[in-house]
Structure formats: structure tokens, C-alpha cells
Image (cartoon, rainbow, N blue to C red):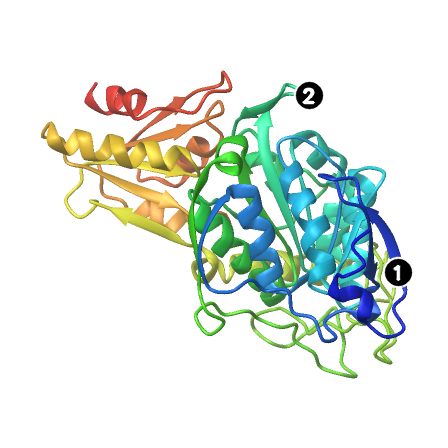
Amino acid sequence: MRQDAPYFNLPTVRTVCCIHLSRGERLFAPTINDMNENLNGDIPPGEYFWEGNEAVAEGAIRAGCRFFAGYPISPSIEIMERMSNRLPEAGGVFVQMEDEIASLGAVIGAVWAGAKAMTATSGPGLSLMAENIGYAVMTETPCVIVDVQRVGPSTGQATRPYSGDMMQVKWCSSSDYQIIALSPWSIQEMYELTVQAFNLAETYRVPVFIMSDAAIAHLRETCTVPGMDELAVLDRRKSPGGPHFGTDDPRGVPPMASFGEGEALLITGSTHDEFGYRKTQDPNIQKKLTTRLNEKILRNADKIAQMEEYLTGDADTVVVAYGIAARAALAAVKQARNRGVKAGLLRLKTVWPFPERTIHSLKARRIFVPEMNRGQIAQEVQRSARANTAVFSITRVDGEVITPGEILEAVLS
């Protein structure tokens, strides 16, 4: 038992028992009411040799995450393991739940208690979270969900990389709603985009997904941790006494209170008015509420969407890629240039909301979309591209990472 750990010295600490997965030691962490008192937990700026899952955990700590609830599932387990160790050091709480349904439920509860909170899972666990994802959307609960994708359907290949959840993460819960999903391609971005995910969740009061996969999660690279003034971290916006589910602000995002602050909070997944009162028989309130839930993301899509372009200035062939497949795509584009093909790369760092206008603005004659699935995002590119642009899907579905050679062969054909 780590009696020398700093969190044992906190005054009047109420404790939650949890298990450190790598060594089986019993840890005790302060409850949510004791978070952020005297403890920081940030690691010093510098270079670290991390795998992707470790970088996500450290990015979450940097962003102010002080609660993690999860259930062990490959290939995301290292996130849970590292958070079980790091959160107590940062004055936070780690809890292993009985399943993924309870995990996201605990995260939602922690957020309304005032914490920044996160969970991590893979495809089968994401399926179990579907109902609570809808609840988080309806209650406008800012939270971060890391989906370390693996081959499916069902249990599939539990340790092999895939990108098969791109549509599931967008549509897994019922009815019409919007989420934000980020797709890192490096260990540096696993860290930085995790910080951005928390910032976006707080800015728009919406669940934000980090769409990793088994390959990027277990890749090891150097990650540079910047100083505290070099990477912005946003706090929750408060407005005492006002409505928490409605606003006249054109951004469409109301301020959010927490339990224990003296606010009269009603949190329901049913149709509700701006003060949280259930109004399930009022069509006007239903229309107003669901319109705002969607439009607060869609109206700000250009602000939210992030992407990078490589060699697209004169390109008549553009590869649109995301995640680890974009690394292979960049190599293929450079090789195609060496063979006289005017090729470029548009890399999507944000997949949802989908950057429709950017895709439509591409004047390329051909667009290729390499993916480790059966062409899920290629369909969105086809829908958004100009009528005279040919869109080709390049797929790999065997649990192996797509290669530059496969993409180059398609581009040269």
C-alpha cells in the first residue's frame, strides 16, 4: 500500500477503494468534493517516450480530468491502468465499474457533481454505452469518451486495429443529435487532441469522442509536453441563477451548474424546458430543444473542424484520410509526386462534424479515401464532393494496417 503517496495527507479525506491493475495494489483516492485541493498532478514539460494510450491519459490529466470510470477491454486497457495510478496522484478519483453501461453513467454523474470526467472503451463497450450517450447528449453533459477501435463485428479480433466505429459513434444512440469526434494520427496528437476534446466538450456541452485504434494506441513515439502557458485548458462556464438548458446566445450553448452550488437542478433525458422541467407532450418545446441540440454543433462546424493539407495546391488527385491510415496516405502521396502524379493529402483531424464544405471545395479530378473498414467515411466524401469529382474507396478489413503501397497502387491506376 502506497502510504507515502501525497493524497493520503489530504485533510478529512473520504475514500473510494480501487485496484491498480498492473501491480494489484490497493489505492485510496479522495472523493469529488476533495478534488483539486492542493494537488495538481501535471508532469513537467519535456519529451516523453509514450505509447498512445499513455499519452491519452496524460492529456486528460493536463486538461483537468479528475474522474475516470471504466471497464477493462482490449485494446484500451492501458488508459484505464494509467488513470488508476495517475488520478490519485492528481487528487482525482478512479473507479472500475461493473460494465460499460455503468461506466458512462458514473462519468455523467461525476460531471454534474463538478468534475471533468472521461471513460475509455472499444467497439463492444461502445455498443453498451449507446443509451447513456443519448442521455449525455440530451442532458448536455460535457464528457470525453476514448474509443480504441478494434476489428468486429462483436468480439471480432480483440487486439487488431480497425476503424469500424466511425459511423457507430455518430449514430449509435436514438433519434437526431450531434457529437464531436477527433481522429489523432500520432502520439503527440493523442496527447494534444485529448486536451482539445475536453475543451470542446466544455465549450459545446456535448460528448466528445477520441477515435483511436489498436495500432495508434500501442505505437510508441516521442511526445513533447508543453509548458502550462502553451496549451490552453478551458474551464466550465457558469451563470448562477439562469436556465441550464436554454439560452438566447446565438451559439446555442447554455452555462452549466453543478450540484452543491445552490442551483435548482433537474436532469432528465425526457423532453424538457430550459429549466429542466419535463414537457413530454409539448411539440413546440421538443422542436426547440432538439433543434438547438443539433444546431449548436452544426452552426459552429467550421470552428470545430480541424484538418491539415499537404501538397494540395496544384493537386488533381487528393487523398482524404484520417487516423493512422493518414500516415500511410502521406507517404503514398509523396511517392506519387515522385512519379509525376499531382497528388495531395487532406487529413481529417475532426471527423464529426464532417467538413462538408471543405470536401466540396476540393477541385481535384479524383479523390481517394483509404480506410480500415468497408468505406464508411468514403460515403460522406462522396456525398459532399463536387458532381464532376470521382471518389474511390480503398479498404482493408483484415485487421492489418493499410500500407502506402496499397494507396499508391490505387492512385497510379
Numbered label tally: 2
State the image quarter where residue 234 is shown: bottom right
318 over 26 or under it: above or below: above
Element type at marker 1? strand
Q: Position of residue 139 (x, y in %)?
A: 76, 59
* Residue ID at (59%, 63%): 63
* Residue ID at (66%, 72%): 236
Element type at marker 2? loop
Q: Nearer the viewer, mark 2 or mark 1?
A: 1
Task: Classify residue 113 as left or right of residue 180.
Answer: right
Q: Amino acid at mark 1?
A: Thr
Task: Give neighbour class at mark 2: few <14, some 14-19, many 20+ (Cα, 10 Å).
Answer: few
State the image quarter where residue 24 is shown: top right
Give residue 153's mark.
Answer: none
In front of the other: 333 or 75: 75
Give residue 155's mark.
Answer: 2
Give residue 15's mark.
Answer: 1
402 over 26 or under it: above or below: above
Q: Amino acid at mark 2?
A: Thr
Determine if residue 388 is in view.
Answer: no
Q: Position of residue 362 (x, y in %)?
A: 27, 44
193 over 113 or under it: above or below: above
* Residue ID at (76%, 38%): 71
In front of the other: 348 or 297: 348
Task: Give neighbour class at mark 1: few <14, some 14-19, many 20+ (Cα, 10 Å).
Answer: some
Q: Position of residue 284 (x, y in %)?
A: 75, 62
Q: Position of residue 147 (x, y in %)?
A: 61, 40
Determine if residue 295 is in view.
Answer: yes
